[in-house]
Amino acid sequence: MNIQQPPSPEIRRRLDAMVAELRQAGALVSPRWMDAFTNVPRHVFVPRLFIQEIDARGITVWCPLDDGDREAWLDAVYSDTTLVTALDEDTVAPADGDGTTGIATSSSTAPSLMARMLEDLRVEDGQRVLEVGTGTGYNAALLSHVLGDQRVHSVDIHPALVGAARERLASVGFKPALVSGDGRHGFPGHAPYDRIIVTCSVTAIPRAWLEQTRPGGVILTDVTSGIEGGLARLTVGEGLRAEGRFTSTTGRFMASRHGERTYEQPRRPTYAPVSGTRDSTVSAADIRANYAFRLLLGGLLPDLELVYHHDDATGALAVQLQRPDGSAWARTPLPGHPGEGVVTWGGTHDIWQRVEDAWRWWADRDKPDHTRFGITADIHTTGMWWQPRDEDERVPIGNLTL
Protein backbone atom coordinates (compact mmCIF):
# COMPACT_ATOMS: atom_id res chain seq x y z
CA MET A 1 0.00 0.00 0.00
CA ASN A 2 1.29 3.45 -0.88
CA ILE A 3 1.60 6.34 1.56
CA GLN A 4 -0.68 9.24 0.53
CA GLN A 5 2.09 11.85 0.40
CA PRO A 6 5.72 10.93 -0.37
CA PRO A 7 8.16 12.06 2.34
CA SER A 8 9.86 15.42 1.85
CA PRO A 9 13.59 15.43 0.97
CA GLU A 10 14.36 16.27 4.61
CA ILE A 11 12.42 13.24 5.85
CA ARG A 12 13.58 11.01 2.98
CA ARG A 13 17.20 11.58 3.98
CA ARG A 14 16.47 10.62 7.58
CA LEU A 15 14.39 7.58 6.61
CA ASP A 16 17.12 6.28 4.31
CA ALA A 17 19.76 6.77 6.99
CA MET A 18 17.65 4.95 9.60
CA VAL A 19 16.98 2.03 7.26
CA ALA A 20 20.68 1.78 6.38
CA GLU A 21 21.48 1.61 10.09
CA LEU A 22 18.87 -1.10 10.67
CA ARG A 23 20.14 -3.14 7.74
CA GLN A 24 23.74 -2.87 8.91
CA ALA A 25 22.67 -4.04 12.38
CA GLY A 26 20.91 -7.05 10.85
CA ALA A 27 17.51 -5.94 12.16
CA LEU A 28 16.05 -5.54 8.66
CA VAL A 29 16.51 -8.49 6.31
CA SER A 30 13.49 -8.99 4.06
CA PRO A 31 12.60 -6.59 1.19
CA ARG A 32 9.00 -6.13 2.37
CA TRP A 33 10.02 -4.75 5.76
CA MET A 34 12.84 -2.69 4.27
CA ASP A 35 10.25 -1.11 2.00
CA ALA A 36 7.89 -0.45 4.91
CA PHE A 37 10.52 1.25 7.09
CA THR A 38 11.73 3.21 4.07
CA ASN A 39 8.29 4.64 3.27
CA VAL A 40 6.38 4.96 6.56
CA PRO A 41 7.41 8.23 8.25
CA ARG A 42 7.98 7.77 11.99
CA HIS A 43 7.68 11.47 12.85
CA VAL A 44 3.99 11.50 11.94
CA PHE A 45 3.39 9.07 14.81
CA VAL A 46 5.66 10.78 17.34
CA PRO A 47 4.71 14.49 17.18
CA ARG A 48 5.83 14.90 20.78
CA LEU A 49 8.14 12.92 23.03
CA PHE A 50 9.80 13.20 26.42
CA ILE A 51 13.55 13.24 27.03
CA GLN A 52 14.99 12.41 30.46
CA GLU A 53 17.27 15.08 31.90
CA ILE A 54 18.72 16.00 35.29
CA ASP A 55 17.44 19.36 36.57
CA ALA A 56 19.33 21.92 38.69
CA ARG A 57 18.37 20.06 41.88
CA GLY A 58 19.75 16.76 40.60
CA ILE A 59 16.26 15.31 40.04
CA THR A 60 15.52 13.20 36.95
CA VAL A 61 12.73 14.89 34.98
CA TRP A 62 10.96 14.50 31.66
CA CYS A 63 11.39 17.37 29.18
CA PRO A 64 9.01 17.58 26.19
CA LEU A 65 10.44 17.76 22.68
CA ASP A 66 8.46 18.53 19.53
CA ASP A 67 8.53 20.41 16.24
CA GLY A 68 9.37 23.62 18.10
CA ASP A 69 12.97 22.34 18.11
CA ARG A 70 12.70 20.61 14.77
CA GLU A 71 16.26 19.37 14.29
CA ALA A 72 16.54 17.90 17.79
CA TRP A 73 13.05 16.39 17.51
CA LEU A 74 13.73 14.75 14.13
CA ASP A 75 17.14 13.56 15.31
CA ALA A 76 15.40 11.77 18.21
CA VAL A 77 12.53 10.42 16.11
CA TYR A 78 14.80 8.91 13.46
CA SER A 79 17.31 7.48 15.93
CA ASP A 80 17.23 3.81 16.88
CA THR A 81 15.80 4.66 20.29
CA THR A 82 12.71 3.84 22.31
CA LEU A 83 10.89 7.14 22.80
CA VAL A 84 8.61 7.87 25.75
CA THR A 85 5.45 9.42 24.32
CA ALA A 86 3.00 9.62 27.23
CA LEU A 87 3.09 10.11 31.00
CA ASP A 88 0.44 9.14 33.51
CA GLU A 89 -1.46 12.34 34.30
CA ASP A 90 -1.99 11.31 37.92
CA THR A 91 1.78 11.20 38.54
CA VAL A 92 2.84 14.31 36.60
CA ALA A 93 4.16 17.22 38.64
CA PRO A 94 6.02 20.35 37.43
CA ALA A 95 9.78 20.57 37.93
CA ASP A 96 12.39 23.18 37.06
CA GLY A 97 12.01 24.79 33.63
CA ASP A 98 9.81 22.85 31.23
CA GLY A 99 10.43 19.52 32.96
CA THR A 100 7.98 17.33 34.82
CA THR A 101 8.17 14.24 36.95
CA GLY A 102 5.89 11.34 36.15
CA ILE A 103 5.60 7.68 35.22
CA ALA A 104 5.80 6.69 31.54
CA THR A 105 2.71 4.90 30.23
CA SER A 106 3.41 4.65 26.50
CA SER A 107 6.38 4.66 24.16
CA SER A 108 7.43 4.19 20.56
CA THR A 109 9.64 1.10 20.51
CA ALA A 110 13.18 1.35 19.14
CA PRO A 111 13.00 0.75 15.36
CA SER A 112 15.56 -2.08 15.51
CA LEU A 113 13.46 -4.00 18.02
CA MET A 114 10.29 -3.38 16.00
CA ALA A 115 12.04 -4.57 12.84
CA ARG A 116 13.38 -7.73 14.47
CA MET A 117 9.95 -8.56 15.90
CA LEU A 118 8.25 -8.02 12.53
CA GLU A 119 10.84 -10.23 10.86
CA ASP A 120 10.31 -12.88 13.60
CA LEU A 121 6.55 -12.71 13.01
CA ARG A 122 7.07 -14.24 9.53
CA VAL A 123 3.77 -12.91 8.30
CA GLU A 124 2.60 -13.96 4.85
CA ASP A 125 0.49 -12.19 2.23
CA GLY A 126 -3.22 -12.42 2.95
CA GLN A 127 -2.81 -13.12 6.66
CA ARG A 128 -4.67 -11.22 9.36
CA VAL A 129 -2.76 -9.70 12.27
CA LEU A 130 -3.80 -8.52 15.71
CA GLU A 131 -1.49 -6.06 17.43
CA VAL A 132 -1.86 -5.76 21.20
CA GLY A 133 -0.56 -2.33 22.21
CA THR A 134 -1.44 0.27 19.56
CA GLY A 135 0.63 3.01 21.18
CA THR A 136 1.48 5.69 18.64
CA GLY A 137 0.16 3.68 15.68
CA TYR A 138 3.56 3.42 13.97
CA ASN A 139 3.75 -0.38 14.12
CA ALA A 140 0.18 -0.66 12.80
CA ALA A 141 1.24 1.58 9.91
CA LEU A 142 4.18 -0.68 9.07
CA LEU A 143 1.90 -3.73 9.14
CA SER A 144 -0.70 -1.92 7.02
CA HIS A 145 1.93 -1.00 4.45
CA VAL A 146 2.90 -4.64 4.02
CA LEU A 147 -0.44 -6.43 4.40
CA GLY A 148 -3.05 -3.81 3.57
CA ASP A 149 -4.90 -2.06 6.37
CA GLN A 150 -8.00 -4.28 6.07
CA ARG A 151 -5.94 -7.15 7.48
CA VAL A 152 -4.54 -5.21 10.45
CA HIS A 153 -6.31 -4.94 13.82
CA SER A 154 -5.00 -3.26 16.95
CA VAL A 155 -6.09 -2.78 20.57
CA ASP A 156 -4.81 -0.53 23.35
CA ILE A 157 -5.94 0.06 26.93
CA HIS A 158 -5.87 3.86 26.56
CA PRO A 159 -8.80 5.41 24.58
CA ALA A 160 -6.95 8.68 23.95
CA LEU A 161 -3.95 6.85 22.47
CA VAL A 162 -6.23 4.87 20.18
CA GLY A 163 -7.97 8.04 19.02
CA ALA A 164 -4.67 9.80 18.29
CA ALA A 165 -3.28 6.72 16.51
CA ARG A 166 -6.39 6.51 14.34
CA GLU A 167 -5.95 10.13 13.22
CA ARG A 168 -2.24 9.68 12.48
CA LEU A 169 -2.84 6.50 10.53
CA ALA A 170 -5.56 8.16 8.48
CA SER A 171 -3.25 11.08 7.73
CA VAL A 172 -0.94 8.73 5.83
CA GLY A 173 -3.74 6.77 4.19
CA PHE A 174 -4.27 3.81 6.52
CA LYS A 175 -7.50 2.79 8.25
CA PRO A 176 -6.89 -0.45 10.17
CA ALA A 177 -9.46 -1.58 12.74
CA LEU A 178 -8.59 -0.05 16.12
CA VAL A 179 -10.34 -0.48 19.45
CA SER A 180 -9.77 0.55 23.05
CA GLY A 181 -9.80 -2.20 25.67
CA ASP A 182 -7.75 -4.67 27.67
CA GLY A 183 -5.53 -6.33 25.10
CA ARG A 184 -5.50 -9.55 27.11
CA HIS A 185 -9.06 -10.03 25.87
CA GLY A 186 -7.90 -9.71 22.27
CA PHE A 187 -10.20 -8.21 19.63
CA PRO A 188 -12.95 -10.85 19.35
CA GLY A 189 -15.10 -9.00 16.83
CA HIS A 190 -12.54 -9.54 14.07
CA ALA A 191 -11.07 -12.92 15.07
CA PRO A 192 -9.60 -15.33 14.10
CA TYR A 193 -6.08 -14.09 13.38
CA ASP A 194 -3.06 -15.67 11.75
CA ARG A 195 -0.63 -13.64 13.85
CA ILE A 196 -0.77 -11.82 17.19
CA ILE A 197 2.09 -9.44 17.99
CA VAL A 198 2.21 -7.99 21.49
CA THR A 199 4.09 -4.93 22.75
CA CYS A 200 3.40 -5.37 26.46
CA SER A 201 4.47 -8.15 28.81
CA VAL A 202 2.31 -10.88 30.32
CA THR A 203 2.99 -13.49 32.98
CA ALA A 204 0.81 -16.07 31.22
CA ILE A 205 -0.66 -16.41 27.73
CA PRO A 206 -4.30 -15.20 27.94
CA ARG A 207 -6.97 -17.67 26.95
CA ALA A 208 -8.44 -15.13 24.52
CA TRP A 209 -5.25 -15.10 22.44
CA LEU A 210 -5.32 -18.89 22.14
CA GLU A 211 -9.00 -18.81 21.19
CA GLN A 212 -8.57 -16.02 18.63
CA THR A 213 -5.54 -17.47 16.81
CA ARG A 214 -6.04 -19.95 13.98
CA PRO A 215 -4.41 -23.38 14.44
CA GLY A 216 -0.94 -22.99 12.99
CA GLY A 217 -0.97 -19.29 13.75
CA VAL A 218 1.66 -17.48 15.81
CA ILE A 219 1.69 -15.40 18.99
CA LEU A 220 4.79 -13.23 19.52
CA THR A 221 4.89 -11.73 23.00
CA ASP A 222 7.03 -10.82 25.99
CA VAL A 223 6.47 -13.52 28.65
CA THR A 224 7.82 -12.55 32.04
CA SER A 225 8.23 -13.84 35.57
CA GLY A 226 9.07 -11.84 38.64
CA ILE A 227 12.76 -12.34 37.85
CA GLU A 228 13.13 -12.10 34.06
CA GLY A 229 11.26 -12.46 30.80
CA GLY A 230 11.69 -12.18 27.07
CA LEU A 231 10.17 -12.45 23.63
CA ALA A 232 8.72 -15.85 22.77
CA ARG A 233 7.31 -17.01 19.43
CA LEU A 234 4.56 -19.56 20.06
CA THR A 235 2.76 -21.63 17.45
CA VAL A 236 -0.87 -22.36 18.31
CA GLY A 237 -2.01 -25.96 17.83
CA GLU A 238 -5.26 -27.81 18.34
CA GLY A 239 -6.96 -27.80 21.72
CA LEU A 240 -6.03 -24.22 22.64
CA ARG A 241 -2.39 -25.13 23.20
CA ALA A 242 0.67 -23.17 22.06
CA GLU A 243 4.38 -23.88 22.19
CA GLY A 244 7.56 -22.17 21.09
CA ARG A 245 10.99 -20.81 21.98
CA PHE A 246 12.32 -17.53 23.22
CA THR A 247 13.54 -15.74 20.10
CA SER A 248 17.08 -14.62 19.36
CA THR A 249 15.63 -11.11 19.51
CA THR A 250 15.72 -9.86 23.08
CA GLY A 251 13.54 -7.06 24.34
CA ARG A 252 11.30 -6.11 27.21
CA PHE A 253 8.05 -4.17 27.33
CA MET A 254 5.91 -2.42 29.90
CA ALA A 255 3.60 -4.79 31.76
CA SER A 256 0.00 -5.16 30.60
CA ARG A 257 -2.46 -3.33 32.80
CA HIS A 258 -6.18 -3.27 33.54
CA GLY A 259 -6.72 0.47 33.16
CA GLU A 260 -5.47 3.41 31.15
CA ARG A 261 -3.70 4.93 34.16
CA THR A 262 -0.38 3.77 35.53
CA TYR A 263 0.30 0.60 37.46
CA GLU A 264 -0.58 0.18 41.09
CA GLN A 265 2.43 0.90 43.27
CA PRO A 266 3.15 -2.18 45.40
CA ARG A 267 3.56 -1.68 49.13
CA ARG A 268 7.04 -2.44 50.42
CA PRO A 269 6.78 -5.71 52.32
CA THR A 270 7.80 -6.20 55.93
CA TYR A 271 10.90 -8.36 55.56
CA ALA A 272 11.53 -11.39 57.72
CA PRO A 273 14.49 -10.91 60.09
CA VAL A 274 18.00 -11.92 59.01
CA SER A 275 18.54 -15.68 59.28
CA GLY A 276 22.18 -15.93 58.20
CA THR A 277 25.16 -14.60 56.27
CA ARG A 278 27.82 -16.53 54.33
CA ASP A 279 30.12 -16.35 51.32
CA SER A 280 28.37 -16.67 47.97
CA THR A 281 29.51 -18.66 44.93
CA VAL A 282 27.24 -16.61 42.66
CA SER A 283 27.76 -12.86 42.57
CA ALA A 284 25.45 -10.00 41.75
CA ALA A 285 27.65 -9.42 38.70
CA ASP A 286 27.00 -13.02 37.55
CA ILE A 287 23.26 -12.48 37.69
CA ARG A 288 23.31 -9.08 36.02
CA ALA A 289 25.61 -10.19 33.19
CA ASN A 290 23.78 -13.40 32.20
CA TYR A 291 20.34 -12.94 30.71
CA ALA A 292 19.81 -16.66 30.03
CA PHE A 293 20.59 -17.48 33.66
CA ARG A 294 18.03 -14.93 34.89
CA LEU A 295 15.50 -16.49 32.53
CA LEU A 296 16.29 -19.91 33.99
CA LEU A 297 15.85 -18.55 37.52
CA GLY A 298 12.49 -17.13 36.55
CA GLY A 299 11.33 -20.56 35.43
CA LEU A 300 12.76 -22.33 38.49
CA LEU A 301 11.56 -19.81 41.07
CA PRO A 302 8.25 -18.48 39.75
CA ASP A 303 7.14 -17.34 43.20
CA LEU A 304 10.08 -14.95 43.59
CA GLU A 305 10.83 -11.48 42.27
CA LEU A 306 14.12 -9.73 41.61
CA VAL A 307 14.53 -6.24 43.08
CA TYR A 308 17.39 -3.91 43.96
CA HIS A 309 17.80 -3.32 47.69
CA HIS A 310 19.44 -0.26 49.24
CA ASP A 311 20.91 -0.67 52.72
CA ASP A 312 20.25 2.59 54.56
CA ALA A 313 22.98 1.85 57.13
CA THR A 314 25.88 0.94 54.81
CA GLY A 315 24.76 2.44 51.52
CA ALA A 316 25.20 -0.93 49.80
CA LEU A 317 23.09 -1.61 46.73
CA ALA A 318 22.31 -5.31 46.27
CA VAL A 319 20.54 -7.73 43.99
CA GLN A 320 17.75 -9.25 46.06
CA LEU A 321 15.44 -12.18 45.39
CA GLN A 322 12.34 -12.23 47.53
CA ARG A 323 8.85 -13.50 47.99
CA PRO A 324 6.51 -10.57 47.33
CA ASP A 325 5.28 -10.68 50.93
CA GLY A 326 8.85 -10.53 52.32
CA SER A 327 8.59 -13.86 54.15
CA ALA A 328 11.79 -15.11 52.49
CA TRP A 329 14.57 -13.14 50.81
CA ALA A 330 18.27 -13.24 49.95
CA ARG A 331 20.62 -10.58 48.65
CA THR A 332 24.23 -9.97 47.66
CA PRO A 333 25.78 -6.52 47.02
CA LEU A 334 26.76 -5.17 43.62
CA PRO A 335 30.46 -4.97 42.73
CA GLY A 336 32.23 -2.24 44.65
CA HIS A 337 29.62 -2.07 47.41
CA PRO A 338 30.18 -3.06 51.05
CA GLY A 339 29.77 -6.81 51.61
CA GLU A 340 30.48 -7.81 48.00
CA GLY A 341 30.75 -11.59 47.67
CA VAL A 342 28.58 -12.26 50.73
CA VAL A 343 24.95 -13.36 50.74
CA THR A 344 22.53 -12.47 53.52
CA TRP A 345 19.15 -14.12 53.79
CA GLY A 346 16.03 -14.07 55.88
CA GLY A 347 13.02 -16.28 56.39
CA THR A 348 12.61 -19.98 56.81
CA HIS A 349 15.16 -21.15 54.22
CA ASP A 350 18.17 -19.99 52.20
CA ILE A 351 16.79 -18.90 48.82
CA TRP A 352 20.31 -18.25 47.58
CA GLN A 353 21.15 -21.95 47.81
CA ARG A 354 18.67 -22.49 44.97
CA VAL A 355 20.44 -19.77 42.98
CA GLU A 356 23.81 -21.49 43.48
CA ASP A 357 22.35 -24.89 42.55
CA ALA A 358 20.87 -23.40 39.39
CA TRP A 359 24.21 -21.79 38.49
CA ARG A 360 26.01 -25.15 38.76
CA TRP A 361 23.34 -26.82 36.61
CA TRP A 362 23.61 -24.07 33.98
CA ALA A 363 27.43 -24.02 33.99
CA ASP A 364 27.65 -27.83 33.79
CA ARG A 365 25.66 -27.65 30.53
CA ASP A 366 27.95 -25.04 28.96
CA LYS A 367 25.66 -22.16 29.87
CA PRO A 368 22.90 -22.64 27.24
CA ASP A 369 21.64 -19.37 25.82
CA HIS A 370 18.06 -18.14 26.00
CA THR A 371 17.04 -19.65 22.63
CA ARG A 372 17.35 -23.13 24.20
CA PHE A 373 14.46 -22.24 26.51
CA GLY A 374 10.82 -22.15 25.55
CA ILE A 375 7.21 -21.83 26.62
CA THR A 376 4.21 -24.17 26.53
CA ALA A 377 0.82 -22.62 27.23
CA ASP A 378 -2.78 -23.74 27.43
CA ILE A 379 -5.90 -22.24 29.00
CA HIS A 380 -4.75 -23.32 32.47
CA THR A 381 -0.98 -22.80 32.66
CA THR A 382 2.03 -21.21 31.02
CA GLY A 383 5.18 -23.22 31.71
CA MET A 384 8.83 -22.98 30.73
CA TRP A 385 11.10 -25.74 29.38
CA TRP A 386 14.61 -26.23 28.07
CA GLN A 387 15.84 -28.41 25.23
CA PRO A 388 19.13 -30.30 25.41
CA ARG A 389 21.26 -29.70 22.33
CA ASP A 390 20.43 -31.89 19.33
CA GLU A 391 17.66 -33.65 21.22
CA ASP A 392 13.92 -33.64 20.63
CA GLU A 393 13.13 -33.89 24.33
CA ARG A 394 11.81 -30.76 26.03
CA VAL A 395 12.33 -30.81 29.77
CA PRO A 396 10.00 -28.75 31.97
CA ILE A 397 12.06 -26.37 34.08
CA GLY A 398 10.03 -27.32 37.14
CA ASN A 399 11.14 -30.95 36.73
CA LEU A 400 14.88 -30.24 36.79
CA THR A 401 16.92 -31.94 39.48
CA LEU A 402 19.52 -29.44 40.64
Image (spheres, rainbow, N blue to C red):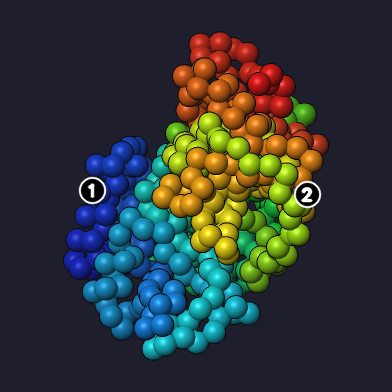
Q: Nearer the viewer, mark 1 or mark 2?
A: 2
Q: Is residue 198 visible in the rendered structure shown here?
A: no
Q: Where residue 327 is drawn, which disc sits there?
A: 2
Where does residue 201 sit, x and y in percent of width and height?
60, 50
- Residue in view at x 66 percent, y 21 percent: 402
Instruction: Tell me which corner region of the image, top left, top right, bottom left or bottom right, holds residue 30.
Output: top left
Between marks 1 and 2, how big is the CA–CA gap? 52 Å
| Closer to us: 116 or 143 | 116
Mark 1 burial class by Cα count in 10 Å: few <14, some 14-19, many 20+: some
Q: Where residue 20 is drawn, which disc sits there?
A: 1
Give the residue type that dot 2 points to: Ser
Give the residue type that dot 1 points to: Ala
Vertical position of residue 259 compared to residue 275: above or below: below
Is 301 left, or right, of 165 in this rendering? right
| Closer to us: 340 or 230 | 340
**Label 1–label 2 contact, CB within 8 A:** no
Vertical position of residue 385 compared to residue 19: above or below: above
Mark 2 burial class by Cα count in 10 Å: few <14, some 14-19, many 20+: some
